Amino acid sequence: MTAVVIVGGGAMGAALAWTLVSDPGFDGAVTVLERDPTYATASTTLSAAGIRTQFSAPENIRLSRYGWRFLERAGDLLGVDVGLRERGYLTLASDPATLRANHAVQIAEGASVALLTPEALAARFPWLSVEGVALGALGLKEEGWFDAATLLQGWRASAIRRGARFETAEATGFHRDGDRVVAVETTDGRVFPCAVAANCAGPWAGRVAAWAGVTLPVRPGKRTVFHFLCREAAEAAAESPLVVDVSGVWMRPEGAGFIAGVSPAPEADPEAADFDPEWALFEERIWPALATRAPCFEAVRVVRAWAGWYEMNDWDANALLGPAPGAPNLLHAAGFSGHGVQQAAGAARVLADRIVHGRSLTISAEALSADRFAKGRRVRERAVI
Ligand SMILES: Cc1cc2nc3c(=O)[nH]c(=O)nc-3n(C[C@H](O)[C@H](O)[C@H](O)COP(=O)(O)OP(=O)(O)OC[C@H]3O[C@@H](n4cnc5c(N)ncnc54)[C@H](O)[C@@H]3O)c2cc1C
């Protein structure tokens, strides 16, 4: 019987637990070690929970499309309503060549994305200014947003009903036999023997990997999300897709208002140390970009803001899946760099296939193997938000 111990019970760990115990070919036992069952600082619950097909790497499109199909069936599979909204992403670009190149990959992968000229954008979204926009890409299917906290609780509760154990415990290290991880130890002195260990520790995955001597290039990067109201924007609120502006600022409707954020340039993205929102970002970068793009956002009122940690993969800003050199039975699902909650179902399927069948049967995502940084291979993704 294969004992699998998963460090971290956020979206990734809970999805992996659920996928394993739901797989008829799996005859093992699954234990998830999660130090905080309230998930107060987990990326999953602090996420913007968007899902898109607008990536440039085929593997990302495959993982997210798998995620969409899973979300559509979450009611049947998990017994929860994840509030899936098919509203699309609208990516605005000043450089049409990149958007066209990405679009060709998306279409080849079966995604449904339309390219819109500035004239077509103005006709379809009259509240948007197309100044400085050369081309837009609008997802017509399989893009939008959902409720990540409900999805997480659905995975967790359903996995427990199907036999997985979730322990409230902080893992502190591995017991090893040669290069193999044979047990996980926790702060309360317990030891959990395993045949396979999984690193699903999100922004903390770099630390967990280090216990096995693996230098995983994953570190936390702070991202602030602002929730604001805008009286002038009622129509936009009702109809808007998630808009990614040429400036990199994104916004989408949320309840009676909107949420928005922006990522820093890689050279200005230090390792995160706290969860304090970066309030100045709204005045300095987000509001000017929004008001330029949509004049209705001239007058807005910020009602709250929160900060969470992206699990940044400094090697190439994409998922690291499976074992890395030096620890063959420690499987990572880490480094998603801001697109992980939509890919959790797919990433869990990839790892579960590997555990149960020894290889990926369902999704072709070998290029995202966690050993690629050691081999000098990168997966280029031009659409990191
Ligand atoms: C502001 C923000 C916006 C985002 N927007 C999107 C988006 O729109 N779409 C999208 O797809 N993704 C988005 N993401 C990214 C997404 O949230 C993450 O990729 C995803 O949630 C990662 O899931 P995870 O389970 O790996 O990590 P987490 O949810 O962080 O879970 C990791 C868990 O591991 C636990 N843990 C860590 N170390 C230990 C230990 N030693 N022992 C026990 N437990 C431990 C932690 O307590 C935590 O609960 C966003 C993230 C942020 C911060």
Image: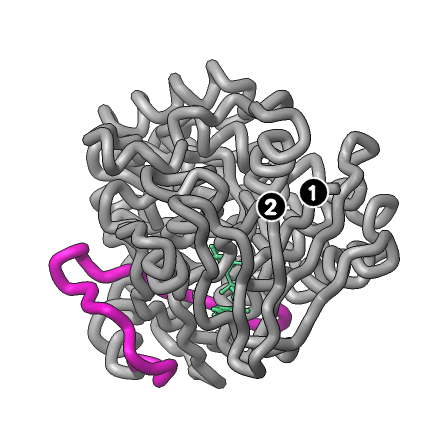
Direction from residue 177 to residue 146 in the image, left or right: right
Q: Identify the mark nearer the N-term, 1 or 2.
A: 1
Where is the N terminus found, in terms of image quarters?
Answer: top right
User: Who's the residue at 53% across and 52% down the image?
Assistant: 182
Q: According to the image, label 1 marks what residue?
A: 2
- Provide the major secondary structure of the magenta segment: loop
Is residue 277 found inside the magenta-colored segment of the image?
Answer: yes
Q: According to the image, label 2 marks what residue?
A: 195
Other residues around mark 1 within 10 Å, as few (<14) / some (14–19) / many (≥20): some
User: Is 83 or 16 nearer to us in this picture?
Assistant: 16
Give the magenta-colored segment's residue range.
255-278
Q: Secondary structure at mark 1?
A: loop
Q: Are marks 1 and 2 in contact (CB under 8 Å)?
A: yes
User: Is 331 or 106 nearer to us in this picture?
Assistant: 331
From the viewer's perspective, is residue 112 above or below residue 82? Answer: above
User: Who's the residue at 27% across and 62% down the image?
Assistant: 289
User: Is 364 or 302 nearer to us in this picture?
Assistant: 364
Which image quarter: residue 27?
Answer: top right
Which image quarter: residue 154?
Answer: bottom right
Q: Tag 1: residue type? A: Thr
